[in-house]
Amino acid sequence: MTEFIAPATRRRMSVSEASVPTLARGTKLRLDETRQRWVLLVPERVMAPDEIAVEVLKLCDGRRSVADITDHLAAIYNAPREEIARDIIAMLQDLADSGFLVEAAKP
């Protein structure tokens, strides 16, 4: 299986365009090769994000800000930046509120 393992735990966050999100400790984004589907593994749960959520989660690497992620996806999907920003912030805030996403530590 291919997987992205989150770095060490960081503090929880209130998501904004300035936020630099990363997966929380114990949270993994993994490609289930048998089913050919990405899954988000969290303690005692498995979530099946849709394709766009997977694209967003792959970019939550602790280096890119939400603004960077928004700009990247707006260019790829040729969609209005404001609409993408609103959707990304809402999705990431839900994940942060559930403890699956945290603010990356500042270097």
Image (cartoon, grey):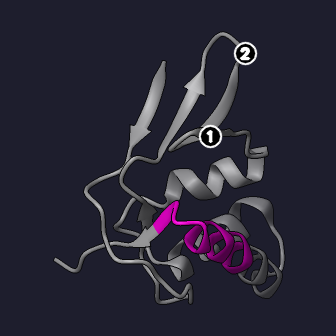
* Residue on which the image places disc 1: 45
For image coordinates 47% across by 82% down, the residue present is 13
Q: Position of residue 11 (x, y in %)?
A: 34, 77
- Name, please, the residue furthest toward the top: 34
| 57 or 43: nearer the viewer | 43
Q: Residue 49: give x, y in percent of width and height.
A: 73, 46
Q: Secondary structure at mark 1?
A: strand
| Kind of residue at badge 2 | Arg
Q: Position of residue 64 (x, y in %)?
A: 42, 70
Decide: few, some or many residues near mark 2? Use Cα within 10 Å; few <14, some 14-19, many ≥20: few
Alpha carbon separation for disc pair 2 and 1: 17 Å
Instruction: Tell me, yes or no, whether the highlighted magenta stretch contains residue 39.
Output: no
> Which residue is found at the position 71% from the left and 59% from the top?
76
Residue 43 located left or right of residue 62 = right
Residue at the spot 52% in from the left edge and 60% down from the top edge: 100
Is 11 above or below relative to 82?
Answer: above
Quadrant position of residue 3: top left
Q: Which residue is mark 2?
A: 35
Q: Quadrant of the C terminus?
A: bottom left
Residue 96 within the magenta-colored segment of the rendering: yes
Prevailing secondary structure of the magenta residues? helix
What range is drawn magenta here? Answer: 88-101
**Lower position in the chain sequence, tag 2 or tag 1:** 2
Q: Residue at x 63, y 71 (%)?
A: 92
Identify the secondary structure beneath mark 2. Answer: loop
In the depicted structure, whether residue 14 falls above or below residue 2 = below
Q: Tell me which amino acid carries mark 1.
A: Arg
